[in-house]
Image: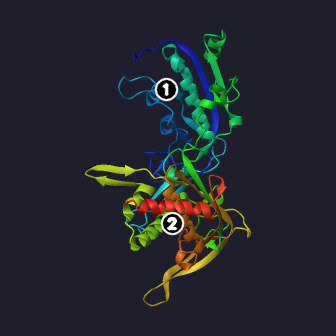
Amino acid sequence: MEDKIGKVIKRIYVKVPIKLETPLIIGSKDSYNADIEVLKDSKGIPFVPASSLAGVFRDYLKQLSNYDKDVIGLMFGKDYGDYTMSCINIYDGFFVGDYKLRIRDGVKLNERKASVKGSKYDYEIVETGASFILRMELVIRDSYSMYENDFKRMLAQILYGLEKGQIFLGAKANRGFGYISIDKNDLSILELDFKKDNNAWDKWINFDWEKFLPNIKSYMELCDNDTLLNKTLYNRLVAEINICSSIMIRQYSKFSEGYPEVDYEHIKCNGKPVIPGTSWAGTIRQSSIMILEELRRESLNVNVDKIIKDIFGYVEDEEDEKASKASLVKIKESIIVDGDEKTRELLIQRVRIDRFTGGAMDTGLYNEKTQHFGKTKLEILIRKNNDYVIGLLLLVLKELNTGIAAIGGETSIGRGLVKVNSISLDGEEVNDEREERYLRDLLKYLRGGN
């Protein structure tokens, strides 16, 4: 196709606040306060770079089967064949209103849940509930007028994906970070038609992102409803869970509100106790390994390492290059709320014991603040057409329910035990019949020589 700029015939402006449903990691090269710090401008205001937004939008469209790769390339710019300029301008998203930054600790654990030497790191996050402003400008030129409907449909599809929680942003998105959403009632869309509207040029010259008046009420007006792909990319497995006694996922800080002498406490986000997706992932992965090892002992031809890597992803160094595979599951961060019994935190004083003498160690006295009781919701997204993964996850939930598996730290002294009250898949209860179906899918997969 001949690459010619052509005359601009339409401009479509889109503005909408994006809310963080879980914490966000948008890292920069700075490492003064943490190993990974949130990207900020010269005034210290965190923002999401336009390149990150464009990348996740483009990737989302590519994952959908009914959008042509070349047309996506025309809209976002082609970096292959005949290079083309992008038809959509996406601007940096600056956080507004009340937002909070916090530093979290991370550590790599081995198969025995012990920390790997030299693997401690920390990273800065923007906490849940913060919002930034998404601004997009679609420029339609005369030379691409035949693709106008395609461009509008893809723009509407992006907004649909944001509304339905199908687009994720930033690092560690498979481990509970970067869940985002929009409210369609906060959406502002302005279309300028330079061929039909004599005032369009004045509106463009005097355009102001803060003051413009929208003339399109819904993103559905950008396309025919029948042409918008309204299917999801993931199966959604949800388990309603009660915390039986106490839980501890450590968060170290210089001080804790109300408890000035606390050495560490259960992790919080925006003042609410949470179970990070990384903690869920560690427990689920380890439990999956134990289940598959047991099935291998039952004479099934099970390549445990390969299956675990296929499901949970991996990054490895191979001949000076990194080989990697994305995870098939996304595990959302869970908030602990009041259940049958009110969730509460308790200050506990403990002492380190000398394993040789059985006595207290010198300077071994310390305080911890644990979280007790309450309920939470475990939400796992599974890439569609991987029913065997659902079968394996149902077995993991059985182990959590029976106390074979526990979540968090200090499990050897009874913390992290939970009770699974109910399980649903895509909004429907997982009864015995559905459970048996997915377990058969798992058995069929394992017998396939994997």
Q: Amino acid at mark 1?
A: Met
| 134 vs 293: above or below | above
State the image coordinates of residue 345 (x, y, percent, origin top left): 67, 69
Q: Quadrant of residue 275?
A: bottom right
Instruction: Please tell me which residue is depicted at 62% across the width and 65% down the height of the picture.
Output: 432
**Residue at numbered disc 1:** 75
Q: Residues within 10 Å of mark 1 (few under 14, many from 20)?
A: many
Instruction: Please tell me which residue is depicted at 43% across the width and 14% down the height of the picture.
Output: 4
| 256 vs 55: above or below | below
Q: How is the image coloured?
A: rainbow
Image position of 217 (left or right of 116): right
The answer to which of 36 and 204 lies nearer the viewer is 204
Instruction: Please tell me which residue is depicted at 64% across the width and 62% down the height of the picture.
Output: 431
Q: Quadrant of the N terminus?
A: top left
State the image coordinates of residue 165 (x, y, percent, origin top left): 60, 44
In the picture, the disc for residue 292 is none
Q: Amino acid at mark 2?
A: Thr
**Which comes before the other along the chain, label 1 or label 2?**
1
Residue 250 seen in the current view: no
**Element type where label 2 sits in the image:** helix
Q: Quadrant of the C terminus?
A: bottom left
Instruction: Please tell me which residue is depicted at 38% across the width and 72% down the height of the picture.
Output: 299
Q: Residues within 10 Å of mark 2 (few under 14, many from 20)?
A: some
**Element type where label 1 sits in the image:** helix
State the image coordinates of residue 197 (x, y, percent, origin top left): 66, 11
State the image coordinates of residue 435 (x, y, percent, origin top left): 58, 62
Image position of 283 (left or right of 190): left
Q: CA distance from mark 1 to mark 2?
A: 42 Å
| 302 vs 403: above or below | above
Q: How many marks?
A: 2
**Residue at numbered disc 2:** 283
